[in-house]
Amino acid sequence: MKATTVVVATACALLSAPVFAQAPSQTNPPANPPRTTGAASTNAPIPTSDFINKIVMGDMFDAQSARLAERKGDSGEKTFAQREVPDHTKFTNEIKAMASSGKVHASVPTSLDNEHQQKLDQLQKLSGKPFDEAYNKDEVQNHESTITVLQQYAQNGDNSDLKQWASKVLPEMKQHLTNAEKLK
């Protein structure tokens, strides 16, 4: 009888081993979840209307904040700003020309949205070192964002003329970012 009990107990132990070896329940989060950077994938498609809105908003903000930097900034910021105004104005005018010619079917914003207007209003209130720090930070962030949007559209945009334009402008915008990073 003891031999039968030992055999049954051993069989039960062997049969239950796979149950204990199963993966943990999916309701428990993993100990080290994968980390994300929060940056948008450059492969994600972006609609033409969103692209135009983001690019023109960034251009208008850069041109208007550069005009402030021409008055309030240090000598490096003034030099940087003198290039920003004509370049970003040119980029916006090129988009407007594509829209008015019918090559692009989307409306082009003519004024800043609330987010960009608030940043501009904040810059207007500052002077000296606080202005320099805020302006420099805004310029780096805005150019990084613009580069991401240009890359997304150049890769996956649905308008061939605008995709070509995004590819053409991308190196110039990368140079703007390099110059903005030197302001720090």
Image (cartoon, rainbow, N blue to C red):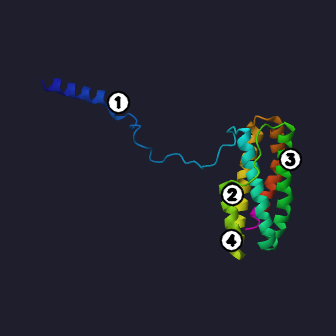
Residue placed under numbered mark 3 in the picture: 94
Residues tagged 2 and 3 counted as in contact (Cβ below 8 A):
no
x, y percent for residue 177: 77, 58
Q: Is residue 134 left or right of residue 169?
A: left
Rate crowding at label 3 as few (under 14), some (14 to 19) or many (20 or more) other CA atoms within 10 Å: some
First reached walking from the N terminus: tag 1 or tag 3: 1
Q: Is residue 90 above or below residue 72?
A: above
Residue 73 can be seen, yes or no: no
Q: Is residue 183 magenta?
A: yes
Q: Is residue 96 left or right of residue 181?
A: right
Give the number of the mark in front: 1 or 2: 2
Q: Is residue 11 magenta?
A: no
Distance from Cα at disc 2 to Cα at disc 3: 21 Å
Q: Quadrant of residue 139?
A: bottom right
Residue placed under numbered mark 2 in the picture: 116
First reached walking from the N terminus: tag 1 or tag 4: 1
Please name the residue shown 66% across and 61% down the image. Answer: 118
Residue placed under numbered mark 4 in the picture: 125
Q: Where residue 18 is drawn, which disc sits there?
A: 1
Amino acid type for the residue under numbered disc 2: His
Amino acid type for the residue under numbered disc 3: Glu
